[in-house]
Each structure stands twice: as C-alpha cells, then as structure tokens.
Image (spheres, coloured by chain):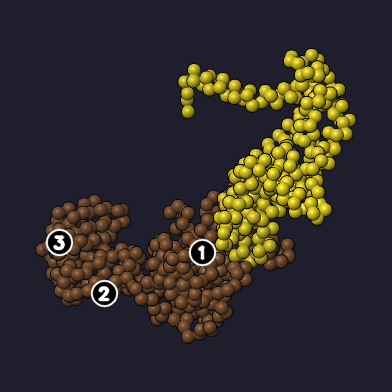
Chain colours: A brown, B yellow
C-alpha cells in the first residue's frame, strides 16, 4: 500500500526541512500485536513525516514500546502493516531496515571499545577500515566523546554510555532513529541537559526521531508531535501544545499534565450542564471571596481552601467546592514576598475563563483518528 | 559480621576437620607414590622415585592414558557442538516441546551411571553388533558424550539467559546478519562458558569408570579402568599410586581453570 494522501500539515513539512514531503517516513496501518491472550497493541494508525521529532507517550504497558519494536523489526505484527519510506517493511528483519535504535539499557557491546562499538554498524556493512575510523570519530565528536574511543563501556558513566549508544545508532546515517526511553536511567540534571543535546543533534542531522517515553514533560519539551498511548491504542495524536491545551479524552487530560475533571453532578452544580470538562490548575485564579465578580465568559466556584502546598516556583492550592468537587489551582510565585497568598480554611472563589475549559470524552473505546490537521 | 572468638575458633577447627576429611586421602596417595614401602606403610619408610620411573615405563598405563585423552577430547568435542546448539535452541527460539527437550537433555546426568551403562551396552550390542561394529573406543566416546553434553548445555544456557537478547538485537539493528551477530557479539560473550563447560566435561570424562565399564569392550582400557584392574595386584600397587597422583593433578587443573573462567563470565556483563 503506497499511501500519499497525508503528511501535508506536519511541522517538518511546514518548516521546509522535508525533501520528499509526500511520503511519510513511517506509516503504520491497523497495527495489532497480541502476546498470547494479551492485546499489547490494537489498531494503531500513524504517519511520521521526514525530519519530524515524534514522541510516543504513555504509561508502562500502554503498547508504545511494542510499537517501537515493530518499527525496528524486533517484533512481527499480528496483523497490520509497517511501511518505511513508502515500502512495506512488515516482514523485513531488523538488519534490512534503514532504521537504528538507541536502547533503553544502551546495549553497548561490553567486549568492544567505545570506538569499536560505534564502528560496528559500518563494519558489518563492509565499510573500509579507514573510512570507518573517520566516520566513527565524527559521530563520537558530535556527542562530545572524541577522547574516549579507546575505553570500554564499563569505564564510562551512565550519561556517557547513553551518548555512545546515540553515536553508534547515528553512524549508519539511518533515515529514522528510534529511541526507547533514552533518558530514563539518568538523573534529573543530566536528563535536562541530554534533552537539549538530543534536540540539537536532531536539528543537526535532520532525520526523523521517534522516541518512547512515559515522562510527559520530556515528550512536551522534545517533540514536534506526539501520540498518547493507553491500553494499546492511540488516545490522541497532535502537536505538543494541541495535546496539552485540548486533551481529547479524560485519560489524556490526566496523563499529560494534570487536570481538574468536572463531571456528573458537579458539572451540573457548577456549570449548569451535563458532560465532562477539564481545566488545567494553572488556568484557575484564586481570589478572595469579596472581590469575586464573574466577568463575561467566566466561571466562578466558591469553596474552602483545604490545602496549600508550597513547591518553590509555584504554590498548589486545593479547594473543596460544592457537590463533592475538589479543584486544584497552581499559583506562580512571582511576587517578591514571603507571606502566603492564601491559607488553609480561607473562603475563596476560583475563577477561570470558559475558553480554558475543555469538553472531554470518556477514554476512547473506538480507534483514535489518525488525522492530525 | 563479628563472631565471638570462641565460636570463631570452633568454626575454624570444624573447617579444618572438614578439609582434612576431603583432602588427606588425596595427599596420602601422592605421598605413597614416593614411598619406598610396597604396602603403603605409614609413616613412609623412605623416599623413592622408582615407582614414577616404573609408571613411565609401564606400557599399559601409558596406552591407557592415551585412550583416556582421546576419549575425553572426542567426547568434549561432541558435547561442545551438540550441547551449545541445544542451549541456543532452547534459549533463543520458541518452539513446541521446548521445556521437554531442555529436561531430556539434562536427564542423563541425574541417571545412575550404571543404568546409562547397561542401557548403552544393550543398545550397542543389539544394534551395532549385527552391523559388525563392536564395543570399542567409539562406543566409550558416545557413552561419555551423554553426560558431557549436559555440562556444556548447562553452562552455555545459563550464560545465554544472563546475557539476554538486547545485545543481539542491537547488533541486528545496526545491520548485522544472523551469522555476523553470532561471530561478533554472541560468541565472544559465551566463549568463557564454552571453555568452562569443555574443561569440566573433559575432567568428568577423564575419570569416568561406570559407563566406561559397560561401553569399552575387552580391547579398550581407559586410565580409570587400568587403575581398577591393577589396584589389587601387589606388584602394581605403587604404580597405581603414581597414576592416581597424576590423575588428581590433571583433574584439578581444568576444574580450577573452569571456575576462574565462569567467574569472569559472570562479571564481564555491562
């Protein structure tokens, strides 16, 4: 199946980094994978454009890693197709795919030096020794490990191993780089630094990056577009901002960032209508009861402060409203003051704009649409 | 952990007793090989090298040694080939009856040697006999291979399980074919286990007597068979001590090497 109807509205195409924008670099068609009676992946349809930085986000067991392994060729789909650069690759073994992977545990060869590890892909492709050394050296320089070629992987730190794995995967100049929880094993500071590095390396080499993560901050920080996985399906597909600002389902609203979900009786009491609605804590203002006039298009809820949690740059305020509703609001600590804005047991009013509130569906039981217009 | 001094001393004595129980008899054999007395009297009546000389000149002992080495090396070679192939099949592929095969491969080492011996003897004489092949070195090698395979299989299988599949996946991902992955990645990782398995298998084969008795036939004599046959001849007893001393050393070296190698294999994982 050569499918060329989509891929016109992706960021990469919009930025003009794409040489062949008609053919997605990766196309998944009705992909399904079962292990015994367990359905790991179910009816996944997805197009990833050339040069895109794409994230697959989801909790563990949501099927995102299985999808990655099917793109790499380590797992054979139970049904459906994996199309790479317009060609059906469903039955191809990993070594016949123009795709390289950075593994979660890095999987560096312990009996080889760093240099030999990076040269490996070229060696098995029969590249001459001199050319091999030059290109591996370039790859190591790119990840700033040019001096460490003679060491064994065991002599490196976690962050250095991660970068060797990256250099080893990039040395073959693949069309697509897959990253399986690439930063999961690193501590926070190093992770933030590596995120920036990954982003700049991706810009430099200009190829498609697909990475799997359970960390929503990481996904939002790095990617152009992301797919949110739950129970083997894609719940939502879209740009980072789109997914965060317009969560399509209750699951997405809760998993990508945190959301207050107002539904059922509470929705009728507070909003005067049926349905389920999500509003982000940072969209909610906490104001003293007396100055709480609702402007046009604003929602107000009266409540009592239950908890105030100071967290450095922000303060989280938990407020009990009517009909058993509990809402949390985050306040940015931008004022140069030591005194708390609100205290426990204060009577306050919460206020937010209608447009900050999203109507959401219960988590999708039907396949998520693949269109990302 | 700190133990009370009395307890520590008590444990020390206990350990020494245990070690003595294990190793004094072996030491006695080595000592007696230099003893001038023919009757192994203790304390030794004097020091002599004449038994070592006689052993070196004994054509029976020497040819038995040769037979044992040939049998051990051949059985080990067969075990390396079949044992490692079985280990790969069981650890790297999913197929019907996988765990049954794993069990059946390991079973021979738990069977009493005498049962294996009788079974092999009956099979060889009733199946190979009519074809004109009698019991001989070949049947000894086959008999030894039945338990040598288990040693190699267990070593390689444990190593492959610890290794996991991620290195092989990484190799395949980088473009290596199945054979390239095996030669560049898998084999270097299991080499230690193969050598350790081979050394242990050889050591097992080298001193095997029960299965050998049933599979050797009259013309073939391995070293243990020769010792057993000569132990109760008063003339030969001192020479038997020499051969036993040599056997002890020959058996210790591969086992010690194997232990070091498999120890390395465990810790060399990133």
Residue located at (27% from left, 53% from top): A310
- Which label number is shown at residue A179? 1
Q: Secondary structure at mark 1?
A: strand
Above or below for A294 versus B31: below
- Pinpoint residue A312: horizontal percent, then vertical percent: 31, 53
Q: Is residue B70 above or below residue B45?
A: below
Q: Quadrant of residue A219?
A: bottom left
The answer to whether dots 3 and 2 both sit on one chain is yes
Which residue bears the numbered disc 3? A303
> Disc 3 vs disc 1: which is toward the camera?
1
- Residue B234 visible to the viewer: yes
**In this orientation, does residue A218 appear?**
no
| Residue B212, placed above or below residue B87 | above
| Residue identifier under label 2 | A359
- Check if mark 2's residue and mark 1's residue have beta carbons within 8 Å: no
- First of labels 2, 1 by sequence position: 1
Residue found farthest to the left: A290
Disc 2: which chain? Answer: A
Q: Secondary structure at mark 2?
A: strand
Q: Earlier in the sequence, mark 3 or mark 1?
A: 1
Asked whether the residues under the numbered discs 3 and 1 touch, taking CB atoms below 8 Å apart as contact, a structural biologist would say no
Q: Are marks 2 and 1 on the same chain?
A: yes
- Provide residue A232's location: percent of width, then percent of height: 41, 68
> On what subunit does the disc labeled 1 rest?
A
């Amino acid at each position: 199946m050569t499918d060329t109807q989509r891929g016109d509205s992706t960021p990469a195409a919009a930025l003009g980094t794409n040489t062949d924008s008609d053919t997605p670099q990766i196309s998944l068609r009705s992909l399904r994978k079962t292990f015994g009676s367990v359905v790991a992946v179910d009816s996944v349809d997805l197009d990833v454009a050339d040069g895109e930085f794409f994230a697959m986000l989801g909790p563990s067991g949501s099927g995102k890693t299985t999808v990655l392994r099917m793109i790499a060729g380590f797992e054979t789909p139970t049904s459906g197709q994996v199309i790479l650069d317009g060609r059906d690759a469903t039955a191809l073994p990993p070594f016949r795919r123009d795709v390289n992977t950075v593994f979660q545990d890095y999987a560096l060869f312990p009996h080889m030096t760093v240099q030999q590890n990076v040269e490996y892909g070229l060696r098995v492709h029969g590249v001459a020794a001199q050319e091999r050394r030059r290109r591996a050296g370039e790859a190591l320089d790119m990840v700033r490990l040019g001096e460490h070629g003679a060491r064994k992987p065991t002599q490196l730190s976690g962050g250095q191993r991660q970068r060797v794995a990256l250099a080893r995967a990039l040395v073959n100049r693949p069309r697509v780089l897959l990253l399986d929880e690439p930063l999961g094993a690193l501590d926070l500071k190093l992770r933030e630094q590596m995120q920036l590095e990954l982003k700049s390396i991706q810009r430099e080499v200009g190829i498609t990056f697909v990475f799997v993560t359970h960390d929503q901050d990481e996904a939002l920080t790095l990617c152009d577009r992301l797919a949110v996985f739950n129970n083997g399906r894609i719940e939502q597909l879209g740009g980072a901002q789109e997914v965060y600002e317009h969560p399509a389902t209750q699951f997405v609203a809760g998993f990508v960032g945190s959301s207050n979900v107002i539904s059922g009786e509470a929705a009728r009491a507070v909003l005067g209508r049926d349905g389920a609605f999500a509003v982000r804590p940072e969209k909610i203002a906490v104001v003293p009861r007396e100055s709480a006039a609702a402007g046009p298009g604003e929602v107000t809820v009266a409540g009592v402060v239950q908890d105030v949690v100071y967290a450095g740059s922000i303060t989280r305020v938990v407020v009990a409203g009517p009909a058993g509703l509990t809402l949390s609001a985050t306040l940015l600590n931008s004022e140069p003051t030591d005194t708390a804005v609100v205290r426990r047991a204060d009577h306050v009013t919460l206020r937010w704009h209608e447009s900050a509130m999203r109507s959401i569906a219960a988590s999708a039981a039907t396949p998520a649409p693949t269109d990302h217009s | 952990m700190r133990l009370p001094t009395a307890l520590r001393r008590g444990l020390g004595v206990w350990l020494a007793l245990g070690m003595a129980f294990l190793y004094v008899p072996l030491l006695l054999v080595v000592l007696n090989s230099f003893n001038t007395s023919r009757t192994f009297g203790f304390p030794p009546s004097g020091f002599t090298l004449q038994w070592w000389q006689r052993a070196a000149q004994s054509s029976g002992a020497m040819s038995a040694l040769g037979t044992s080495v040939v049998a051990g090396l051949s059985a080990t070679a067969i075990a390396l080939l079949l044992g490692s192939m079985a280990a790969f099949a069981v650890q790297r592929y999913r197929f019907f009856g996988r765990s049954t095969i794993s069990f059946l491969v390991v079973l021979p080492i738990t069977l009493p040697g005498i049962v294996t011996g009788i079974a092999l003897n009956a099979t060889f004489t009733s199946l190979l006999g009519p074809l004109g092949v009698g019991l001989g070195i070949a049947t000894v090698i086959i008999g030894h291979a039945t338990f040598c395979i288990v040693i190699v299989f267990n070593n390689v299988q444990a190593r492959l399980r610890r290794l996991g599949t991620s290195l092989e996946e990484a190799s395949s991902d980088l473009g290596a074919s199945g054979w390239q992955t095996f030669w560049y990645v898998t084999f270097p990782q299991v080499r230690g286990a193969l050598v350790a398995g081979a050394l242990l298998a050889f050591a097992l084969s080298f001193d095997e007597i029960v299965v050998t008795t049933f599979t050797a036939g009259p013309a073939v004599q391995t070293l243990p068979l020769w010792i057993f046959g000569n132990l109760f001849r008063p003339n030969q007893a001192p020479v038997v001590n020499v051969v036993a001393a040599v056997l002890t050393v020959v058996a210790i070296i591969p086992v010690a090497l194997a232990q070091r190698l498999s120890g390395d294999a465990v810790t060399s994982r990133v």
